[in-house]
Amino acid sequence: MGKDNNPSTLKEVVDKLRETHLLVAALVATVAFTAAIAVPGGYKADDKGTVDEGTAILSHNSAFKTFVMTNAMAVVSSLLAIFLHFLSVFIHLKAAESLVLKCILVTDGLTVFTMAAMVVSSSAGSYAVL
């Protein structure tokens, strides 16, 4: 932003950051949700109709459990960040700028947490398969 702290310039920067962070949160939510559906190691396929049919092969592996927990945290926190991004638009219409900036800071923190959870989830999933 430099020396020019013009409110219109600051607003443009904040809006551009919000758009970028919304895109990142949406992409992470998509990847995390896809990873939850296509679990590492696959599913048990049993033609006999037993109770274990359709469960994850690695369900008793601790690294797989870590994958499931951190992936779930990534999905939830990224969806919460997306929700707060949309909510901040409505807050902007009704409330003060300081509340909108606080909302953006929370969404930024959630997005950073989401990316960290994705790293742990990806590592745990790879470790569980190997």
Image (cartoon, rainbow, N blue to C red):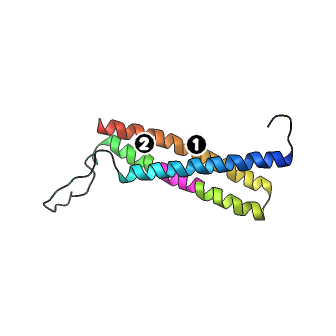
What residue sits 54% from the left and 56% below the top?
A: 79
Residue that numbered label 1 is attached to: 112
Disc 1 secondary structure class: helix
What residue sits 51% from the left and 48% below the top?
A: 28
| Left or right for 17, reference 35 | right
32 or 117: nearer the viewer: 32
What residue sits 77% from the left and 65% below the top?
A: 94
Question: Which picture quadrant has residue 120?
Answer: top left
- Verify whether residue 125 appears in magenta: no
Identify which amino acid the numbered label 2 is placed on. Ser
Residue range in magenta is: 73-81
Give the main secondary structure of the magenta stretch: helix
What residue sits 35% from the left and 37% below the top?
A: 126
Identify which amino acid the numbered label 1 is placed on. Val
| Left or right for 113, reference 128 | right
Could you say which disc has been placed on residue 121 in the image? Answer: 2
Query: Is there a contact, CB below 8 Å, between mark 2 and mark 1?
Result: no
Res 85 seen here:
yes
Q: Position of residue 48 (x, y in %)?
A: 12, 60
62 or 18: nearer the viewer: 18
Residue placed furthest toward the left: 48
Res 73 seen here:
no
- Verify whether residue 80 appears in magenta: yes
